[in-house]
Image (tube, rainbow, N blue to C red):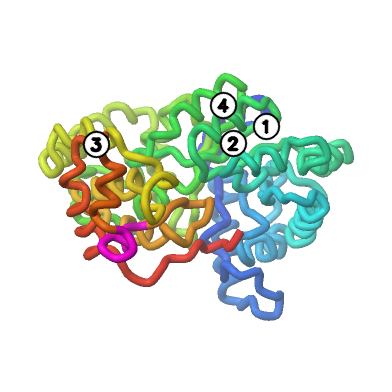
């Protein structure tokens, strides 16, 4: 089978495959296990997934310091799956103390058993202070530039789960060669960040389009029917890859067979517009039928930020989850996201609706909804979400 099509990864000039192998689902644990606790079965599965990905042309492998045992297990697997065209990326979070950042960077190299990273991302520029920690004199970027001068790092980018204005500011700084960002069919609010990256000639890598794009590896029956004749994974991949601002998307494969639908999408890319249009029309019609045109046109109007809402309730995210749940039955995704609110820190900020009618009264909520045309309906929507989705808090897989 010929290699995957590549795209120029912005000013890095690297020829990056349309599909990248993400190292966040095939590792044994989200804890950085000692070597003695990694099982032979887990390592064999990772090895098989890496080998098949390499054979199919997924030459870009992406992992992170805080993806549990991923770096260690990949470091063991690389020598037995050589690839002279491999592009290796890892990610290290910014630190207030650049020495702590450098120590984690060195540990990534040790775990991966590598002498050089082609791509290093500053992991999680989610707040203005993360950008400041990175770019200030004596900050983390000075460590990176020193390692670049020593030939140990090729290009530097950033990954982000933060608000669009922070992402745009990071792009506009001119300090980064690429970015890893969330943007896919169910979440298109970061489009201005794609534009900013394009103006800077930055590479653009789409994070987790299958999992964070709606739990598409376990789609609802309703979503399957609305996307027919293509699988929701194929539809979403085509949506992302037809956009010229996007250069590659992450395939978070837990096993070798998880690559199949993504490869199918690449094979259909020349017909993307014809395949996307009818599915998009059905998805939008389903949303109109269940939610109503008036709601879809105005639900965001007048919503306060979570910082300005009693109990830190994140109304924009919760109402977005309501839309996904009602229109397309994305229940497992909505449940996971709902339960992460309140425990996700700066990675997924704000809180869910559990405090409503407990620590937060309807009167307190109403006081910040004065500019919303839906102020009377929103409390009942939140109660419905709470009844349907509440449960044990969902913790981020990575604690950093």
Q: Earlier in the sequence, mark 4 or mark 2?
A: 2
* Mark earlier in primary sequence (4, 1): 1
Residue 118 as seen in the image, left or right of residue 247: right
Which residue in the protein does label 1 denote? Answer: 176
Query: Disc 4, disc 2: CB below 8 Å?
Result: yes
Instruction: Name which residue lies at 51% across and 32% down.
Output: 165
Q: Are marks 2 and 3 in contact (CB under 8 Å)?
A: no
The reply to whether the magenta stretch includes residue 355 is: yes
Graded by Cα atoms within 10 Å as few (under 14), some (14 to 19) or many (20 or more), the crowding at tag 2 reads many
Identify the residue at horizontal 12%, vertical 37% (top origin). Answer: 292
Give the Cα distance between marks 3 and 4.
33 Å
- Which stretch is magenta? 352-360
- Displayed quadrant of residue 302: top left
Residue matched to label 4 = 197
Q: Which residue is mark 3?
A: 372
Q: Is residue 221 magenta?
A: no
* Distance (Cα) linking label 2 and label 3: 34 Å
- Marks 1/2 in contact by CB < 8 Å: the verdict is yes
Label 3 with label 1: CB-CB less than 8 Å: no
Q: Is residue 252 above or below residue 128?
A: below
Residue under circle 2?
179
Q: Are marks 4 and 1 in contact (CB under 8 Å)?
A: no
């Amino acid at each position: 089978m010929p290699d995957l099509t590549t795209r120029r990864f912005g000013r890095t000039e690297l020829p990056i495959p349309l599909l990248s192998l993400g190292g966040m689902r095939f590792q044994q644990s989200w804890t950085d296990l000692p070597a003695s606790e990694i099982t032979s079965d887990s390592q064999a599965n990772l090895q098989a997934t890496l080998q098949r990905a390499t054979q199919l042309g997924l030459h870009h492998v992406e992992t992170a310091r805080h993806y549990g045992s991923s770096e260690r297990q990949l470091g063991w697997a690389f020598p037995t799956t050589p690839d002279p065209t491999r592009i290796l990326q890892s990610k290290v979070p910014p630190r207030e103390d650049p020495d702590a950042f450098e120590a984690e960077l060195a540990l990534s190299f040790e775990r991966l058993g590598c002498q050089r990273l082609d791509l290093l991302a500053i992991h999680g520029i989610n707040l203005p202070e993360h950008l400041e920690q990175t770019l200030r004199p004596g900050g983390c970027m000075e460590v990176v530039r020193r390692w670049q001068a020593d030939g140990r790092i090729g290009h530097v980018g950033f990954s982000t789960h933060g608000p669009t204005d922070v992402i745009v500011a990071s792009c506009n700084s001119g300090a980064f060669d690429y970015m890893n960002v969330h943007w896919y069919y169910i979440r298109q609010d970061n489009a201005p960040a794609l534009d900013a990256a394009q103006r800077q000639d930055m590479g653009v890598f789409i994070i987790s389009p299958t999992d964070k794009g709606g739990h598409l590896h376990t789609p609802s029956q309703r979503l399957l029917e609305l996307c027919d004749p293509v699988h929701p994974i194929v539809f979403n991949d085509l949506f992302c890859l037809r956009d010229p601002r996007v250069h590659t998307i992450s395939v978070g494969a837990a096993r070798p067979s998880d690559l199949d639908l993504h490869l199918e999408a690449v094979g259909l890319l020349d017909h993307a517009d014809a395949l996307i249009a009818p599915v998009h029309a059905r998805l939008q019609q389903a949303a109109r039928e269940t939610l109503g045109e008036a709601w879809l046109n105005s639900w965001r109007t007048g919503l306060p930020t979570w910082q300005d809402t009693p109990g830190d309730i994140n109304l924009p995210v919760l109402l977005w989850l309501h839309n996904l749940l009602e229109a397309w039955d994305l229940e497992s995704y909505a449940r996971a996201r709902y339960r992460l609110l309140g425990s996700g820190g700066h990675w997924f900020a704000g809180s869910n609706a559990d405090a409503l009618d407990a620590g937060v009264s309807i009167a307190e909520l109403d006081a910040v909804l004065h500019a919303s045309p839906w102020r009377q309906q929103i409390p009942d929507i939140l109660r419905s979400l709470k009844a349907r989705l509440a449960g044990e808090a969902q913790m981020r897989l990575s604690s950093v």
